[in-house]
Amino acid sequence: MKILVCISHVPDTTSKINFTDGDTKFDTNGVQFVINPNDEFGLTRAMWFKEKQGASVDVVNVGGPETEPTLRKALAIGADTAIRVNAEAKDGYQVAKELAKVVKDGGYDLVIAGRESIDYNGAMVPGMLAEMVDANFVTNCISLEVDGTNAKATREIDGGKESVSTTLPLVIGGQKGLVEESDLRIPNMRGIMMARKKPLNVLEPVGASTETGSVKFEKPAPKGEVTLVAPDNLDELVNLLHNEAKVI
Amino acid sequence: MSILVYTESENGTLKKAAFEVASYAKAVADQMGTSVTAVAVNVNDTSELGKYGVDKVLNVSNDGLAKFNAKSYASVLSQAAKQEGSKVVVLSQSADSKYLAPLLSVGLDAGYASNVVAVPTSTSPFTVKRTAFTNKAFNFTTIDTDVKIVGVSNNSFGLVENSASASSEDFSPEIAISGVTVESVDKVTDKVTIADAEIVVSAGRGLKGPENWGMVEELADVLGAATACSKPVSDLGWRPHSEHVGQTGKPVASNLYIAIGISGAIQHLAGINASKVKVVINTDPEAPFFKAADYGVVGDAFEVVPQLIEKLKAFKSANA
């Protein structure tokens, strides 16, 4: 089985979020970039398929040279080959179109993406990609088994979960739960050494256009002071929630 | 040319989100000088949609759609949008709607903006405000295609009453064959889900152990709330993964979020930021959560929560 894992290069989850250039760009100053958390679960699951079922695992990112360290981390975790499509990621549609070319040219059976990235939260690349390459699609994926060309997956739904069966070619939008948090692979010294020798291929983009455009960003209004209520005056809390906040 | 809105349902009954997206669609319809057409699948009674500005309902009645299937449902909406000549399609951001949205987007060549929190600031270029960086910022985005899809964030717009006819029409689209088959659904039916809840009661490591969760569940019961937990608590196995709320867990957009024994790490805050009112109960006055809270009680949860339960029971009786 040929697996392609989509890796988004995103600000670390504890990053302060600020904007520059008249609030049109994310301020990367002092920001650490990491593999998108949802993608990490997918990458670890891909490693399982590699080790137990002999699958090959490539990783791909659509981005400029600044994303290469993140791709190298994925190689250090155990992927075979990294691919960087040399284009600035502008919107979900454009990224999906670029990925579609990689998927078709590479003949991948299974594409593991993250259900959404923690920076733009578009939650659209995996589904769009599936349609573009005529693959089946399951998102919010919290379990995946593959047997030949048959696959079984679990989708997390509001209030529970749903078991589905499907076939390859398949695209999934993975998330936490796809593997246990404690099983997430991290690069070790050996992995990092080996990653240096693994191929990181830079491909020219097809030059896909966008369907949406970012105008500007805005930070939320600063929060007011908390209203503290003494622990022996909970009547006041009930009163505030009912009469002031009007939530009960 | 009407605004198309997918009004979702469960077991034949429209969900609250359906009325919110209908309200949003009506607001967009007013901006663009057109009407609202809703698509309802296997719904027993769609008349209540008239209260929220829906002029026409396309009623789809089909056993093949008894279980939700993203590809089939996207195809239904695509056919409806084409029939109606709709330029804007409004969806909720429920798990199912988020699942079908990108498929619908490709099917209609329609640009899609997710997590939208307000009516368009402009209809030309079509510009909407959405959340980004997991609720740490807003992003104004244009949708530049002829047909546009807007995913409205849960509890961001609210229900707005606007009387309309909701005249019902049968709609029988072709059902696209999907390569994904639902084998079984395992769903809690007697409790409100985190996504649908108006109030969420959440607890963290401050509760010291899973055996202490009785009071959290009791507080949730009194308030008719959903229960949730912080990431460490779900990682430790004290509570199920499905209760984990935060950046890598479920998002919370309820009216009230009560956090008990949760310090308020950035990742937790990001996930619950869309909730309207936050109450924090924690022994540590320096807990970062107090900076993000609207109301706070510095005290021992094991004393505060039982007392709060009693006060709320009394309040509920007095206000019944």
Image (spheres, rainbow, N blue to C red):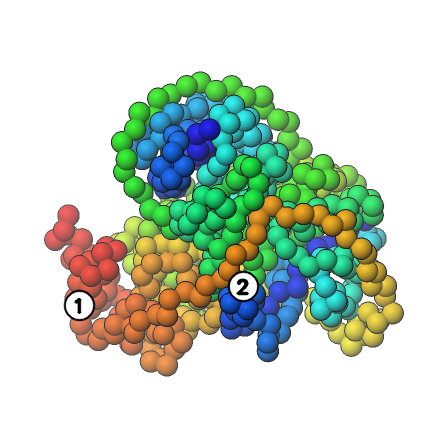
The residue at 20%/64% (across/down) is A240
Q: Amino acid at mark 1?
A: Glu
In the depicted structure, whether residue B284 falls above or below residue B26: below
* Badge 2 or badge 1: first in the primary sequence: 2
Q: Residue A44: where, in percent of width, then height?
A: 70, 60
The disc label shown at residue A236, or none = 1
Task: Kindly give the residue lying farthest to the front in the view shown.
Answer: B124
For mark 1, name the chain: A
Quadrant location of residue A185? Answer: bottom right
Q: Visible in this render: residue B106?
A: yes
Residue B162 relative to residue A129: left or right: left
Q: Residue B300: where, in percent of width, then height?
A: 30, 75
The residue at 45%/43% (across/down) is B123
The residue at 62%/34% (across/down) is B107
The disc label shown at residue A24, or none = 2
The disc label shown at residue B263, or none = none
